[in-house]
Amino acid sequence: MNYIAGSDRTEALLLPEVLDDYIALENPVRFIDAFVGQLDLGKAGFTNAQLQETGRPPYDPGDLLRLYLYGYLNRVRSRRGLEREAARNLELIWLLRKLRPDFKTIADFRRNNGGAIKAVGREFILLCRKLELFGGELVAIDSTKIKAQNSKGRNYSEAKLKALLAEIENKVSGYKGVRPRRRAGRGRRR
C-alpha cells in the first residue's frame, strides 16, 4: 500500500492550471477586488492614478490598495510582512495577479497616499458593517468580579465619544509604521 502522492514538482504541464480555481467564490479577497475595482482612484486622491506619457510605468495604485486592505483584514501591518505575503500567500497572488511589489514600493505608496488610504479604508469598513460581512470582537468574562461604577470618568456621552474619536484620528494620522528593533550589543561606543 502506498501513501497518497502529490504532483511531481518538476513535471511540465501541457495545459496550465487557472489561478482563479484556487480561490473560492465566497473568499473575502473577491470582495476586496470588487470594492477597489469600482473606486475612482484619481478622485479619491491617489498618486499615479493617471499614467504619465514617458518614463517607467508605476504599479497601479488599485493593486497596492488591494494589498493594504488585505493586510488590514488579516492583521499584516508591516511593509516587509506584506512583501513576504505577496510572494507566498495564494490569496494575495490571486488578488495582485502575481505581482510582487517590494517593501520600498509599499512604503512609498503608504507615505504618498496616507490620506486617501485612510478615507478609502473608512469607506471599506462602513460598507463591510452595512453588509454584515464581519462582526464585532467577542469579549467573554467568566468568574471575574467587575466594578459597577458610573462615575464621571467611566461614562460616555455623545460629546465625549466625539472627542475620543478625534483623539484616535490624531494618533492614527501620526502613525508612521513599525519601527525596527535595535540589535543587542550595538549601542554607542565610547
Image (cartoon, rainbow, N blue to C red):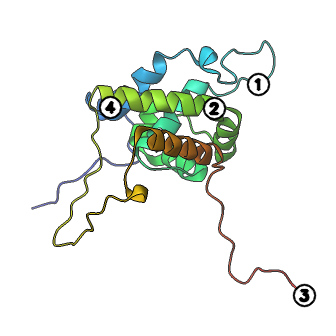
Along the polypeptide, which appears first: circle 2 or circle 1?
A: 1
Residue 140 drawn above or below residue 172: below
Along the polypeptide, which appears first: circle 2 or circle 3?
A: 2
Q: Secondary structure at mark 4?
A: helix
Q: CA distance from mark 2 to mark 1?
A: 25 Å
Q: CA distance from mark 1 to mark 4?
A: 39 Å
Residue 127 drawn above or below residue 142: above
Near mark 1 (Cα within 10 A), the count class, few <14, some 14-19 or many ≥20, is few
For disc 2, the marked residue is 115
Q: CA distance from mark 3 to mark 4?
A: 56 Å
Residue occupying image coordinates x 78% and y 80%: 187
Q: Nearer the viewer, residue 150 or 166?
A: 150
Which of the two marks, 3 or 4, is nearer to us in this view? 4
Residue sitting farthest toward the right: 190
Instruction: Indicate the position of residue 104 as horizontal and vertical percent values.
Output: 69, 45
Question: Is 55 placed left or right of 26 in the picture?
Answer: right
Three-letter amino acid code at disc 1? Arg
For disc 4, the marked residue is 129
Question: Is 98 placed left or right of 53 in the picture?
Answer: left
Residue 50 drawn above or below residue 73: above
Residue sitting farthest toward the left: 1
Residue occupying image coordinates x 63% and y 42%: 173
For disc 3, the marked residue is 190
Q: CA distance from mark 4 to mark 2?
A: 21 Å
Three-letter amino acid code at disc 2? Gly
Q: Nearer the viewer, residue 58 or 158?
A: 158
Q: CA distance from mark 1 to mark 3?
A: 47 Å
